[in-house]
Image: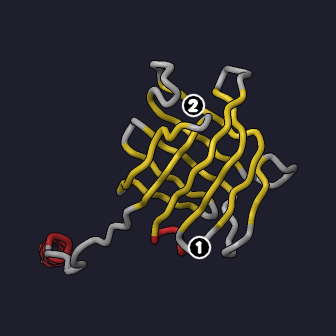
Amino acid sequence: MKKSIYVLIVLMCVFSVSLNSCSKDDDGDITTLDGKYTLVMDGTTVASGETEEVGMVGNAISLSLGEDFGFIVAGVPETVGDEAEIGAQGSGVSVSITGKNLLKSGDDEMYFSISGTVKRTSSSKITFEGTCTEFGSTMVHTFSGSAESAAYKII
């Protein structure tokens, strides 16, 4: 008898948990924050527009457009008007750019910053400029750009 009562209680608990787990969540609509971007390399605009693929972790931001284009800016200043130097010893500030056929090479491309600056121009906008090299190459390119999203206000 004790065993059947115990089994009955366990089954009722499982049933109760499954009913609560499967009920409809009332979270409402998920808020998405779009982003605007511009990227100029060697004096030519290689990407600009809007996207929903905006990310942020700590003081690093990312923005992408599928597999066609993306960049990560690490070491974004927290205060509006502040500027951080890319490549300064111990700064942790860098810009990485990836994309397909950005400089018309016909291939996937990946560039890493050498020097330059990252500036927070407003609570939601970050600008950057400097020099970079393509992965596996010694050729130096110039780059500049901006990323803007309400998501960046959290930094």
Left or right of residue 138: residue 53: left
- Quadrant containing the C terminus in the rendered view: bottom right
- 55 or 71, nearer to the observer: 71
Is there CB contact under 8 Å for labels 2 and 1? no
> What is the secondary structure assignment of the residue under circle 1?
loop
In the rendered image, the residue lying farthest to the front is 43
Using the image, determine if residue 103 lies above or below residue 76: above
Image coords of residue 70 (percent x, y): 48, 43
Q: Which numbered marker is on residue 31? A: none
Label 2: few (<14), some or many (≥20) within 10 Å? Answer: some
Using the image, determine if residue 13 lies above or below residue 137: below
Using the image, determine if residue 108 lies above or below residue 69: above
Residue shown at 64% from the left, 26% from the top = 135
Mark 2 vs 1, N-terminal side: 2
Q: Amino acid at mark 2?
A: Met
Q: Amino acid at mark 1?
A: Ser
Residue at which label 2 appears: 110
Residue shown at 46% from the left, 66% from the top = 149
> What is the secondary structure assignment of the residue under circle 2?
strand
Label 2 or label 1, whichever lies nearer to me, is 1
Residue shown at 61% from the left, 42% from the top = 96
Quadrant in which residue 35 is drawn: bottom left
Image coords of residue 89 (percent x, y): 87, 49
Residue at which label 1 appears: 122
Image coords of residue 69 (percent x, y): 44, 39
- 28 or 96, nearer to the observer: 96
Image coords of residue 72 (percent x, y): 57, 48
Left or right of residue 90: residue 11: left
- Quadrant containing the N terminus in the rendered view: bottom left
